[in-house]
Image (cartoon, grey):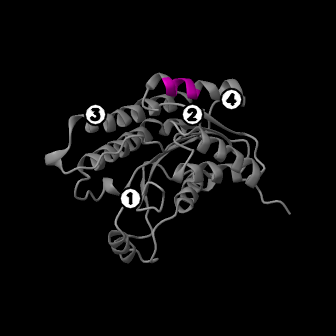
Amino acid sequence: MATQQRLQNKKVIVTGGSRGIGREIVLGLAREGAHVLFTYHRNEDAAKATVQAARTLHNNNNVMATQTDFSEPAAMKSVFEFIPKNFGGEADIYIANAFTEAAFAPTAFMNEQDYDRMFASVKGHYFALQQAAHHINEHGRIIVISSGAAAQPGIASGAYSGAKAALEKFAVSLAKELGSKNIAVNVLSPGVTATEGLVAPQEMINALVAQTPFGRLGKPEDVANAVVALCLPETAWVTGQVIQANGGIL
């Protein structure tokens, strides 16, 4: 018996869907039958591989990729306008995952150029959420991917933590603004996750693992499964929340 697809024909936009957590979010949505348009910044080969994986693993031919600099408001406006022109209606779900520039340095040594590039991503998210406010269907979902660093800044992560914290406040405010349209807006905040972007000494990784009740780092699919859960009808009452998907890290 075929597994019921719980998001069948739902139209979804995912930013940053070619690799890591974003890729697993796209595949998780494809598994549930969603029609997905995801953005990528530079890596066309990775984007093509994600599309192919959706078709091969989940027999879903309604997954598409578009090269987009999400930090440019005009570019994201075009992404939202693409959905009704090609998918037969406005988007039901928007997942803000991309974050193109992350800069880590002690406050005393952060340079202005790295700071400005990172906060261009923050500006991009704000105006992409503005587009979502105009385009997402009633009873839809908006999910912003944050970071555990927003709640627990560490050494050299002050600017990054502040950037992610800003995204969380954008989302919580938007949840209040869109409540009359029954659009749920939430933040999902992953803990340390084993992706290709995780660059840390083994000693640090071991220390992080020791802080988790499950005794391991998170996997991209752990985060993606939580995202999919927030898209389901059963979670329609959940809005304005910052949800930690971190394996209980202490």
Q: Residue 218: image x %, image y %? A: 48, 66
Residue at 58%, 57% in the rendered image:
229
Q: Which residue is mark 4?
A: 89
Q: Which residue, given by chain and number where applicable, does mark 1 sit on?
A: 199
Identify the image quadrant of the N terminus.
Answer: bottom right
Q: Label 4 neighbourhood size at 10 Å, few (<14), some (14-19), many (20+)?
A: some
Q: Which residue is mark 3?
A: 116
Label ID, residue 161 = none
**Mark 3 against mark 4, which lies toward the viewer?**
3
Pick out the residue farthest to the left.
108
Label 1: element kind: loop
Question: Which residue position holds label 2?
Answer: 136
Q: Main secondary structure of the magenta part?
A: helix
Q: CA distance from mark 2 to mark 1?
A: 36 Å
Task: Tell which tag, 3 or 1, sits nearer the viewer.
Answer: 1
Within-10-Å neighbours for mark 2: few <14, some 14–19, many 20+: many
* Contact, mark 2 vs mark 1 (Cβ under 8 Å): no
The part of the chain drawn in magenta is 75-80
Q: Earlier in the sequence, mark 3 or mark 1?
A: 3
Tell me whether the residue at label 3 lies in contact with that at label 1, contact meaning CB atoms closer than 8 angstroms.
no
Residue 76 belongs to magenta span: yes
Q: Position of residue 43 (x, y in %)?
A: 54, 40
Whichever of labels 2 and 1 marks the residue nearer the N terminus, that label is 2
Q: Are marks 2 and 3 in contact (CB under 8 Å)?
A: no
